[in-house]
Image (cartoon, rainbow, N blue to C red):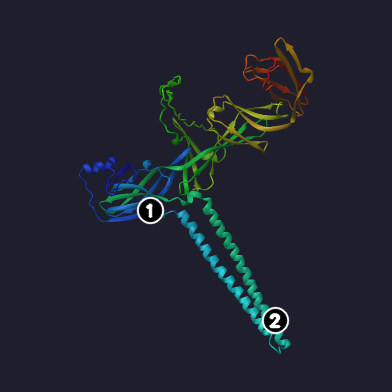
Amino acid sequence: MKIYFKALLTLFLSKNSIVHSSIGLGILLLGFHFPIFSQGQLKIDAENQHITVFLNRAQIDARVKTNVQAGTTKLIISNVATTADPNSIQIGGKGDVMIMSVKFKQNYLGNKRRSTLEDSLKLAKSELEVVDVLVKVAENERNMLMANANVKSEKDGATPEDLKEMMDFFRTKLTEIGTRQMQLLRQSKDLQDKINRFQQQLTSQGTNINQPAGEIELTLQAKSATAIELNLSYIANNVGWSPIYDIRAKDVKSNIELAYRANVYQNTGIDWKNVRLSLSTANPAEGGAKPELYAQYLNINEPVETPKRNVRMSKGVMPVEMAMSAAPQAMDEVITVASVVNTVQSTLAVNFDIAIPYNIASGGNPEMVDIQNHSLRSTYKYYTVPKFDKDAFLTAIITDWEKYNLLPGVANVYFEGTFVGTTEIAGGEAKDSLMISLGRDKKIIAKRETVEEFKSRKNVGSNIRESFGARITLRNTKTEAINIVVEDQVPVSQDSRIEIELEEAKGAEFNKETGKLTWNLTLQPLENKEIILKYSVKYPKGKNIQGL
């Protein structure tokens, strides 16, 4: 009879304990009993089918197909992540069997990755030892030949013909030995390079290469020989992905093209080969429990005198940890590899199902996976802060960007086909627009200079009034008109005795709390503009004003 069973497995259950699934329990209630036969052992690799990668951790879904004999069988499932969370393991499947017990264990002798590298390293070292012996043999042959040459030359009565024959012989033999030595030395160098590479590979894998192999041990009981098909699911640690973006602007009249990508990394101890991937914006590591607020008590710490010591008593504030929920991600028109990504949005997260299978090595470099492409409607504006920098900076302003719910990440910025730098995208901010800097434009010249004639110092009763002024000049050397924002500032008082008065800043927006001045200007081709800024500071006599 066919059985479907599903059990939440726990670590280190004893061999004779029974994992009761609802169906298994039903079988026992019906009075069906499995006879006890001799116990056999079977080992098989789990075949990873689908992996859902969260921002931190991953859910691995695998499959196992095999045949078991009648009686009790100990099934060892290998190719399991060594970082698996034992409490998350679930098994379902079909077969005329009962699960008697389950264990998750780590096999310190079963790391195939390390074994393969170490075997290759040992083989290369053995080959090098043989080559080194052959080099010494050739050197001994050469030394013996030269010793015989000395003996031959010391003989009396050697004829010219004898000398010629001797020279030809030694020339031939020395050439043969020398050629063989050069070939052996080349082999020795190549083998030493190979050994170094194997050692570097072992070192580069770090602790990952030293990880034990993960295994799940099932004790199964069958009435008769039968085929079984198991579906295995569990959560693995040391896995995750992070967003990275490419932002491209063709010119100041085109939309911003945003490529949404993911850097997927994994250090599970097993390689993912030809698996289907899903990327989720959920983060199981953050936890899903709502934070609780506790009473916040206030008290005044007052010393209480006693004959021996002073005692201070106070009430504390209980800390509260806030859990962040992952921002959902919407999908716009896609035009590259992202076209094979299916976006599934749930209440709490978004999943990106990648149709193309991927290979991702454990402990290797992160794999870049395309997710989405967006064409973002943008407006372009120049900004300059001549107080600190004479250049103007081109920026792209994206409105309604919050509907894309982008996750925080680094963006590579390209303008007119040239890489101009990186910027940060901070998802979840309560702003109605996103500003992206596209770099400097040397064709817009900004200059700020202090005007000495605007400076003055006067006594006003018990106070001193100092006046300051600056001239900002702008020039557009481009052949088209531009919109530019000019920013400057005046000091902000943090003392009621210090008064600041803005005397001249025609056309500027003024934020009194921050002292920031903003001019929104349009510069026609080859146009010059001048901005005058004047302000005064009044403060008590004899006081040294910090920051003035």
Residue at 63% across, 69% down? 182
Can you give x and y, in whole percent of width and height, for residue 225 in the image?
28, 54
Can you give x and y, in whole percent of width and height, for residue 411 in the image?
59, 36
Pointer 2 with pointer 1, Cβ within 8 A: no
- The single residue placed furthest to the left in the displayed view is 31
SS state under label 1: strand
- The single residue placed furthest to the bottom in the displayed view is 157
Q: Which mark is residue 285?
A: none
Q: Which mark is residue 44?
A: 1
- The single residue placed furthest to the right in the displayed view is 453
Can see residue 53?
no
Can see residue 435?
yes
Identify whether 355 is placed above or below 317: below
Residue 130 placement, left or right of 145: left
Q: CA distance from mark 2 to mark 1?
A: 68 Å
Of residue 99 and residue 210, the one placed in the foreground of this image is 210
Of residue 142 and residue 156, the one placed in the foreground of this image is 156
Which quarter of the figure is the C terminus placed in? top right
Residue 544 placement, left or right of 215: right
Q: Earlier in the sequence, mark 2 or mark 1?
A: 1
Q: Which residue type carries mark 2?
A: Met
Q: Which residue type carries mark 1?
A: Ile
Crowding near the residue tagged with mark 2, few <14, some 14–19, many ≥20 C-alpha atoms within 10 Å: few
Residue at 58% across, 61% down? 192
Identify whether 160 is placed above or below 391: below
User: What residue does disc 2 label?
Assistant: 167
Can you give x and y, in whole percent of width and height, for residue 250 in the image?
66, 34
